[in-house]
């Protein structure tokens, strides 16, 4: 079984960056991300040692899939977006966060709702979003290598609409 701390240590080798649709590397920049970004495979993230939150979540999912149930979430408002992973085993829900430097850590909760509430609060604090401003939190399925930024938005908004439609 992979220990949480071992995976976090492995993730420490990954820097903020991304591959574009032409396989060019972009390091520490979001310039042109919405036009050129595509999801890297876990193997590409390990090889290139770069990834944004969506890439890192897919690598983390692969590293944990044998030991935990995993669920990825996208959290966003009209300006910012982030993704993260919740791990579940028995009565333990773990908010595993590497890609957000201000929130990096391994946080344990007894209920999934508590983990999600904490992750949402951290996102708001990190991005200076007023407490009363709404952010959207949407679970999403694993992303395929090559998925573009626009496709991620479409997937997340589709999941959001589907969930809201089922709650009406």
Image (tube, rainbow, N blue to C red):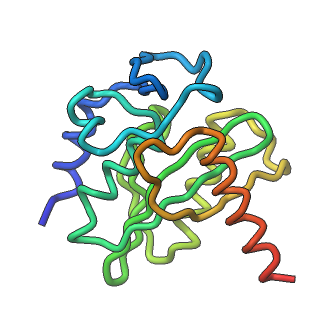
Quadrant location of residue 166? bottom right
Label count reads 0
Left or right of 49 on screen, residue 140:
right
Q: Is residue 168 above or below residue 50?
A: below
- The quarter of the picture where the N terminus appears is bottom left
Query: Outermost residue toward the left?
Result: 1
Q: Position of residue 137 (x, y in %)?
A: 67, 59
Where residue 34 appears, as percent x and y from the top left, is: 64, 29
Q: Is residue 99 left or right of residue 166?
A: left
Name the foreground residue: 70 vs 159. Answer: 159
Left or right: residue 92 compared with residue 8: right
124 w.r.t. 52: above or below: below
From the viewer's perspective, tell me whether residue 25 is left or right of residue 112.
Answer: left
Residue at screen point 22% across, 49% down? 7
Residue 39 % position (x, y): 45, 40
Q: Residue at x 73, y 57 (%)?
A: 157
Give the answer, above or below, for where 139 lies relative to 55.
below
Q: Residue at x 82, y 77 (%)?
A: 165
Q: What residue is at 45 percent from the left and 23 percent from the top?
A: 22
Quick one: 89 or 81, which is closer to the camera?
A: 81
| Residue 168 position within the rendered picture, expressed as x and y whole percent measured from the top left | 87, 83
């Amino acid at each position: 079984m992979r220990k949480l701390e071992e995976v976090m240590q492995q993730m420490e080798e990954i820097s903020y960056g991304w591959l574009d649709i032409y396989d060019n590397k972009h390091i520490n920049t979001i310039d042109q991300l919405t036009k050129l970004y595509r999801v890297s495979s876990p193997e590409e993230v390990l090889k290139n040692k770069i990834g944004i939150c969506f890439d890192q979540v897919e690598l983390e999912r692969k590293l944990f899939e044998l030991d935990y149930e995993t669920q990825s979430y996208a959290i966003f408002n009209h300006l910012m977006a982030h993704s993260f992973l919740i791990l579940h085993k028995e009565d333990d829900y773990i908010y595993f966060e590497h890609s957000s430097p201000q929130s990096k850590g391994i946080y344990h909760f007894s209920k999934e709702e508590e983990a999600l509430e904490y992750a949402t609060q951290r996102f708001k604090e990190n991005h200076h979003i007023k407490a009363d401003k709404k952010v959207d939190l949407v679970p999403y399925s694993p992303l395929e290598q090559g998925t573009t930024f626009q496709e991620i938005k479409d997937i997340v908004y589709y999941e959001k609409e589907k969930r809201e439609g089922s709650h009406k």
